[in-house]
Structures are given as structure tokens and as C-alpha cells.
Image (cartoon, helix red, strand yellow):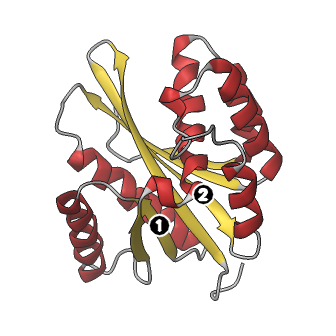
Amino acid sequence: MTALSRLVAYVDESSTKRGNGTQEYLVCATIIDVDAAERIREKLSSLRLPGQVKLHWTAESDKRRRRIIAVIAGLEVAQVLIAHRSETDPRTERYRCKCLEQLYFELQQMEILDVILESRRPGQNTKDLEHIVALQNRGQATGIRLSHVRGGEEPLLWIPDAVLGAFNTRFFGQDEFWSAVCDCVTVLRSTPDSL
């Protein structure tokens, strides 16, 4: 990869309880070459059901999940997954920041600077931007460029959603989905202060 990378990271997040009073906040970045982006969008869009705005793992049946994960596994795109395990706490924004900080570090090492986060509420999007500015003011995540896009407007964001869903289903005894995509995960790391 060169400094003028044509790779873009599409990022989604998940937060779930893990038992024993713990939870795990996760972010997943799917790395897409801009030259392949439109072809991949078309493949993913063809999976939508009539009237469906976007693919969303938690809303899909196991039959649909198998089809979605098979398509994603066939794309051979890289995934970067960062986790932070903590005691159960409904206030997850600080865990998001910890995961994103580690993600930005990993992406920067890969010379990937363009990062597209799934849009949330406007105030939350603003916090994401303030966070990256604060990191860059400390000399971290230099060069990372953030933008937010709604999940229904960008099919490429459906990939990290499904990868996170596959990762999470392992904890409920369903390994088949994760087994299909785990070879595409090039980085699977916990934050430094994760439990």
C-alpha cells in the first residue's frame, strides 16, 4: 500500500452484554478499494428485500444471514475488528472512543486515511469529529479523514454490520457465520485497557 492509498475504511459498531457483568464494545472496519466499491455496492444492494432500506444483521433470519455472509465471504475484503470489554455500563461513548482510537492507529499503520463511519444522531457525529480533532492535536491519527454516511445510503456499511453480527453470534453458540468470514479479518485486537 502506498501513502496515496485508494483504500477506504467503512466502519460500524456494536455493543453487547457478554455475561458475568461484562459487555463488549466493538468496531469493525471493512477495507474497500475505491475501484471495487461500485461492484460491491451492486452485489450488496441485490440482497435487499422489497421495501428494505438496508441490510441489518439483527433484523435478518438465519437463512438470510447465511446468504448475506456467503456474499461477504466471497468479496475477499479485509476486516479490522477492535474490541473493548468492560463491566456493564449503559454509557458506551467512552468505549467507542477507545475502540476508534485503536482503529485509527491500525488504519494509519496500513496507510488508510479515509474513514467513513455510519451516521448516528447529529450530536454523536459531532462527538466523533471532536474526538478525532483532539487525537490529532495530540499528534495521533494524523491524516485520518472522517465522514459520516447513513447506513441506508451506503451499502458498504452493511459489511461491517454483518461481520460484527457474525462475531457476536459465536457467543450464542452459532459459529457458522464467523467461520465463513474470520479468514478475512486481518486485525482482531482489544484496546490496551480492555478487561
Q: Quadrant of residue 71?
A: top right
Q: How many marks?
A: 2
The amino acid on which the numbered mark 2 sits, given as a three-letter code, is Leu
User: Is residue 48 shown left or right of residue 25?
Assistant: right
Which numbered disc covers residue 116?
1
SS class, disc 2: helix
Name which residue lies at 72% across and 27% down. 66
In the rendered image, which quarter contains the N terminus? Answer: bottom right
User: Is residue 182 shown left or right of residue 155?
Assistant: right
Where residue 119 appears, as percent x and y from the top left, is: 36, 58
Name which residue lies at 42% across and 45% down. 13
Q: Are marks 1 and 2 in contact (CB under 8 Å)?
A: yes
The foreground one among 2 and 63 is 63
The foreground one among 54 and 78 is 54
Name which residue lies at 23% across and 41% down. 92
Q: Is residue 92 above or below residue 57?
A: below
Q: Quadrant of residue 128?
A: bottom left
Specify which label sits upstream in the sequence, 1 or 2. 1
Where residue 158 appears, as percent x and y from the top left, is: 57, 48
Q: Decide: few, some or many residues near mark 1? Use Cα within 10 Å; few <14, some 14-19, many ≥20.
A: many
SS class, disc 1: strand
Q: Is residue 158 above or below residue 130?
A: above
Name which residue lies at 67% across and 65% down. 32
User: Is residue 56 shown left or right of residue 85?
Assistant: right
Where residue 181 appears, as percent x and y from the top left, is: 72, 38
The amino acid on which the numbered mark 1 sits, given as a three-letter code, is Ile
Which numbered disc covers residue 156?
2
The foreground one among 2 and 157 is 157
Q: Decide: few, some or many residues near mark 2? Use Cα within 10 Å; few <14, some 14-19, many ≥20.
A: many
Where residue 84 appears, as percent x and y from the top left, is: 37, 40
